[in-house]
Image (cartoon, rainbow, N blue to C red):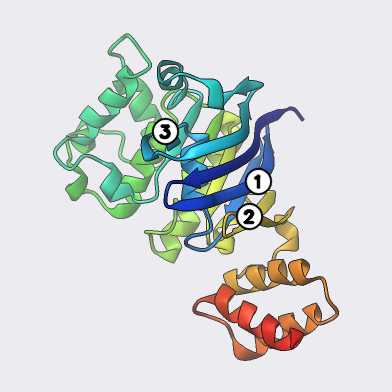
Amino acid sequence: MAILLDVDVTVDYPQKPRALDGVRFTVNERESVAVLGESGSGKSTLVLAVLGLLGWTGAKISGHIRYSGTELLELTEKRWRALRGKEIAFVPQSAVAALNPAMRIGSQMDEAWRVHARDKQWKAPTLELFERVSLPATDSFLRRFPAQISVGQAQRVLIAMALLHRPRLLVCDEPTSAVDPATRDEIRELLIGLSESFGIANLMITHDVGALSGLCTRAVVLKEGRVLREASIADLPLSQADAYARALSSLYAEPSARDLLELQKAVGLRNEPVRQAEDAAGALRR
């Protein structure tokens, strides 16, 4: 299978050197890859880098990001505008914050359409997508404001908006973090179905291993801007604490790694799983 996205980047902010330190991975055509990590691990910086938005932050980036053979780090903003939203689409983390509260849903879909299309025929493809993402495909729904729809519906609107121009790569930043567990499962199943029917590759940024079941095939685990581990989803347990403990175990590569896993189970890590796992590992090494 051909490589669609090839990433090998180092990013330095003026006040935070090595926000990303040699982060390297690939995403194949039609493949879904997860990037896992706690807050501060570099996930947001990676999203900005892949979307060509780091220039606005004053960050310095080195290495390469190649999309379908094109070096994205060499693109001008004009070329980026032709690519971003059409070939590489984005589903942001906070659906409610991402939608303009002063604009009706239909007007926002129209605006997203006109960025990459010269005609004004946005309504038919929008309603078709709304049906695909289980939204009301009606004029009355298009006339609603974001405050008049649920968080789950807002997330579906953003997914439909991202798919409006049939992109080849969908970058999703924590798409299930702001919804309840039942809606999370619905969004995951929706992304699975859309990926299969549209032939889209996914780069899923998340901290929730459970949200990846059936969607992603591989995971890249980040911590403090570095890749701790890359593995198939099948090799990762279905809990955040266990995933980090497993990643930390592979780092230490000592006989005590098995003890670390047993210890984290014994103490029942729930909050701050990485910090507690590291403390446990340190105690074992001493």
Secondary element type, mark 2: strand
Q: Is 159 on the left-hand or right-hand side of 41?
A: left
Q: Nearer the viewer, residue 78 or 82?
A: 78
Please say whether residue 192 is visible from this viewpoint.
Answer: no
Tag 1: residue type? Gly
Please say whether residue 276 is visible from this viewpoint.
Answer: yes
- Labels 2 and 1: the sequence-earlier one: 1
Residue that carries the numbered disc 3 in the rendered image: 55
Q: Nearer the viewer, residue 194 or 216?
A: 216
| Farthest top residue in view | 118
What residue appears at the point 66 percent right and 90 percent down from the top-left corner? 266
What residue appears at the point 41 percent right and 21 percent down from the top-left corner? 77
Image position, residue 169 (x, y; %):
55, 32
Image position, residue 45 (x, y; %):
48, 46
| Quadrant in the picture for the C terminus | bottom right
Q: Is 51 on the left-hand or right-hand side of 62?
A: left
Image position, residue 80 (x, y; %):
45, 22
Secondary element type, mark 3: helix
Tag 3: residue type? Gly
Q: Are marks 2 and 1 in contact (CB under 8 Å)?
A: yes
Residue that carries the numbered disc 1 in the rendered image: 22
- Labels 3 and 1: the sequence-earlier one: 1
Residue that carries the numbered disc 2 in the rendered image: 226
User: Residue 234 falls in which quadrant of the image?
Assistant: bottom right
